[in-house]
Amino acid sequence: MASREQIMEKVEGLIGPFNNKGVELKEETTFANDLEWDSLTVMDFVAAVEDEFDIIITMNMQAEIENVGQLADAVAKLMDN
Amino acid sequence: MTDLLSKFDPLIEERETLLATGVKDPFSLVMEEVLSPTVAICNGRETILLGTYNYMGMTFDDDVRQAGLKALEDFGSGTTGSRVLNGTYSPHKDCEEALKEFYAMDHAMVFSTGYQANLGIISTLAGKGDYVILDIDSHASIYDGCAMGNAEIVAFRHNDAEALEKRLKRLPAEAGKLVVLEGVYSMLGDVAPLKEMIRICKENGAMTLVDEAHSMGFIGENGRGVVEDQGVIDDVDFIIGTFSKSVGTVGGFCVSNHPKFEIMRLVCRPYVFTASLPPSVMATASTSIRKLMHSGNKRAHLWENSKKLHKGLRDLGFELGTPEAQSAIIAVIMPNLEKGAMMWQALLEEGLYVNLARPPATPANMTLLRCSLCAEHTSEQVDQILGMFEAAGKAVGAI
């Protein structure tokens, strides 16, 4: 089972190719405002996260996830189930 | 007081900026007279219609109009009631019979619009704890059906069968699953790989719904849609369609062979809590549907038109949404909204109407000039259309 720290590291690695502005990543970094992702980028990124961890992040869940820390929490919870 | 409309300020500003460049408002065109399925008077000028979804040109069919007039005389102007109370007249039942004949299926349910058909069927079928799996480029009515229900929503990359399969396999085996697909996607006019996708759905225990709004009457030997063309019509659980395209009037429907389908009439809120369609609309729809069963020649001519327009536009140097004509929708990709609006207006001044489609309706933030052909367009009209695209494209520097 991956630790929260390992998940965070992997998530940051997955953000890399989509981080066109080179924004410094913190727990509080938001996808919409800080990274300025549009819906298409979000879709591609979510697919990458889903494939990496072999999970499903439903659109209902995505609506609740605003920043990097919340995503790592959600991934940890989904892997627990 | 917080002005609740202030959230739309960015859109208001964008529109004002666009209109300040001198282009006409592309979203407030008025058809002053309609001469035929392919020609109208707009701004006092005779205009070829190339953005109506009136694929089979049934709106001015003599039999269709006569049936509507007779029903208007016999049954009055409207039902003033729900289908489950006082709003089911014999023309409504006859229209459902026509759909059952057209699709060779056991059950048909008519809604007041195609939008409501998706809204109602999706939100009612998939409840709490169930999953709806949909293509990311799905129509707004499919997304709204998801938003109205209580199911978990999972999206996959457009037309990507592998992405669909991966997601289905990750969902709990025992959970209820509805996969929602479209035969033809209306923005780019591309067709879904239904044969492969429906097989994947079956293998993974998911029920399937296919929206055939843009293929009914045209695609498939009997015009039953992409499901017929790809040989999977017997494997899908529900087909959704509309009367506002090939059928040439307004209304929506769902057909199915599911033995319990009739219960949907009592539990589907967008079916129950709205007035039924006017009997004249039902009579025009059923007459049109029965004629569409035997319209093989018109289907062939519409394919000719679509292929000719696609090749002609590509040869002129326009970027198109599909590598070849896959449906009667040919989408011309414009570099941005401003150029798209300029081109749209230049075409209108030439005497051609197409749809200007913009985000968020379009995939990948594209601006599109969407053309939809009609079986009643003559080959000469398609030549004229290509001439207009050439003149307008050169005038605004799009080619």
Image (cartoon, grey):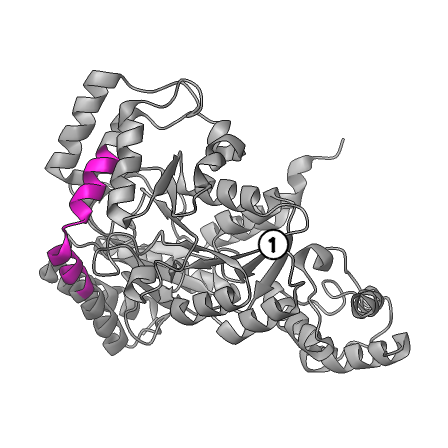
- Say if the magenta span includes residue B324: no
Residue B88 locus on image (x, y percent): 36, 23
Q: Quadrant of residue B251?
A: top left
Is B145 located above or below residue B264 in the figure? below
User: Given the image, on which type of amino acid does mark 1 rest?
Assistant: Gly
Q: Quadrant of residue B326?
A: bottom left
Q: Chain of mark 1?
A: B
Q: Is residue B24 left or right of residue B260?
A: left
Which quadrant is the C terminus of chain B positioned in? bottom left
Residue B173 locus on image (x, y percent): 64, 63
Q: Quadrant of residue B91?
A: top left
- Say if the magenta span includes residue B289: yes
In the picture as drawn, the residue positioned furthest to the front comes out as: B259
Which quadrant is the N terminus of chain B positioned in? top right
* Residue at the spot 40% in from the left edge and 38% down from the top edge: B113
Start and end of the magenta stretch? B284-303
* Residue at the spot 28% in from the left edge and 34% down from the top edge: B95
Q: Is residue B189 left or right of residue B352?
A: right
Residue identified by numbered label 1: B176
* Residue at the spot 22% in from the left edge and 43% down from the top edge: B289
